[in-house]
Amino acid sequence: MNLSPKSQSYIELEKKYGAHNYSPLPVVLAKGQGARVWDVDGKEYLDFLSAYSAVNQGHCHPKIVKALMDQAQKLALTSRAFYNDQLGGFEKWICELLGFERMIPMNSGAEGVETALKLARKWGYEVKKVAKDQAKIIVVQDNFHGRTIGIISASTEAASKDNFGPLLPGYVTIPYNDLPALKTALQDPNVVAFLVEPIQGEAGVIVPQEGYLKSAAQMCREARVLFMADEVQTGLARTGKMLACDHEGVKPDVLILGKALSGGMLPISAVLTSSEVMLTIKPGEHGSTFGGNPVACAVARAALEVIQEEKLAERAEKLGQKFRAEISSWNHPLITTVRGKGLLNAIVVKPHGKNAKGEPRTAYDICHDFLDQGLLAKQTHVHAIRFAPPLVITEAELDRGLAAIKKVLDASSK
């Protein structure tokens, strides 16, 4: 892809003055609406990443933008040193919507996960009566829950952990989608929680066997262990249900939400659980200056209302089935796997040909080629490509995206 001088100038600014902790595809975006975005030169793209599923409601949804602007002009931030007129009502509303007793608001998804980890340990010591500093939390291989020191201590990805130690103890790692391994790990009386993604997004949209979540939740309850679902990426209609756990009728003991909770407007996350778990945290033991600010409450409520009013879960289910069926019907020689739920999908591609460096072409090279066809997608790991367009995408736009994917794959296989 040939970059214009204008695009190149923005990229060079980031390279010169920013941290090199990302490797973005070479496109500089300036505008978004629905499932489409435009770069600084006015070229249009279909967004098939949705900011890692943060933009389920589409870019700049008018209802969410209005909620943001209206509240920002009245009161933006008080901190939690005082009450505000938005938080209590939103807490009640989201708890009733999702069937929980209490909610604690945070900002990023990683903060939500850290909050859940602290809640699990506090509950373990004060309610389950685990011996001091002996609490353990079960996690799974290839998990992704964020980038804080506490969270990367649970990671099995070398790039997430190398040279960031010393890491925190207290994690037990088992294979994903392995109920016998979970059963064995739960025999340890010091285990207080099992933290799991209902579908592993960053690992390449790994979908567990049917019944895994239901059985895991039941096993946890029998062992008096909290079943904690990280639905930061899978939640809020992305997989064809409001929550991915809903596919198996599972209610987590602790639910972590983020990303689409704001419709892409600003960082908002939340942890929902029971009074028994939540009230183990006392004043001064946890908090956030921006968590639960009035703008976030107004935006999150509008974002959730959009999901309900526009039936985005049902839309994701229908269009997701079409997406997977269409790609599967190609029997494409470069594709080894098609998987997903709703509009959270991935394909796995074979190494093929040589790129400009003389190395075997991978998913990254294909995503680079998508840019020329006006499609934005991102590889995850070496050979998987994740496709997660905004849930407001039209069927015609989905067809355009499918045509672009096929065109690139066909050219790559020659």
Image (cartoon, rainbow, N blue to C red):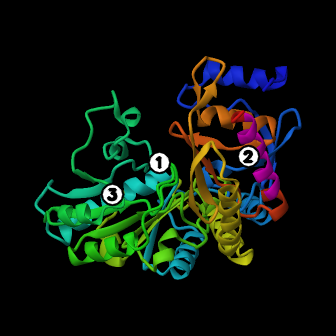
> Does 9 sit left or right of 355 as displayed?
right
In front: mark 3 or mark 2?
2
Crowdedness near tag 1: few (<14), some (14–19) or many (≥20) residues, C-alpha within 10 Å: some
> Does 271 sit left or right of 360 as displayed?
left
Mark 3 or mark 1: name the one nearer the start of the chain: 3
Alpha carbon separation for disc pair 1 and 2: 21 Å
Crowdedness near tag 2: few (<14), some (14–19) or many (≥20) residues, C-alpha within 10 Å: some
Tell me which segment is drawn in magenta: 399-411
Q: On the image, numbered disc 1 is attached to which residue?
A: 203
Amino acid type assigned to the residue bearing label 3 in the image: Leu
State yes or no: residue 239 in magenta: no
User: Picture coordinates of residue 123 (x, y %)?
Assistant: 25, 67
Q: Secondary structure at mark 2?
A: helix
Q: Is 139 in front, or is 102?
A: 139
Q: On the image, numbered disc 3 is attached to which residue?
A: 117
Mark 1 or mark 2: name the one nearer the start of the chain: 1
Where on the picture, by quarter, is residue 283? Answer: bottom left
Amino acid type assigned to the residue bearing label 2 in the image: Ile
Is there any visible trace of residue 75 in the rendered image? no
Q: Which labelled disc corresponds to residue 399?
A: none
User: Picture coordinates of residue 287 (x, y %)?
Assistant: 41, 56
Amino acid type assigned to the residue bearing label 1 in the image: Ala
Q: On the image, numbered disc 2 is attached to which residue?
A: 405
Q: Residue at 55% across / 25% down in the picture?
A: 20
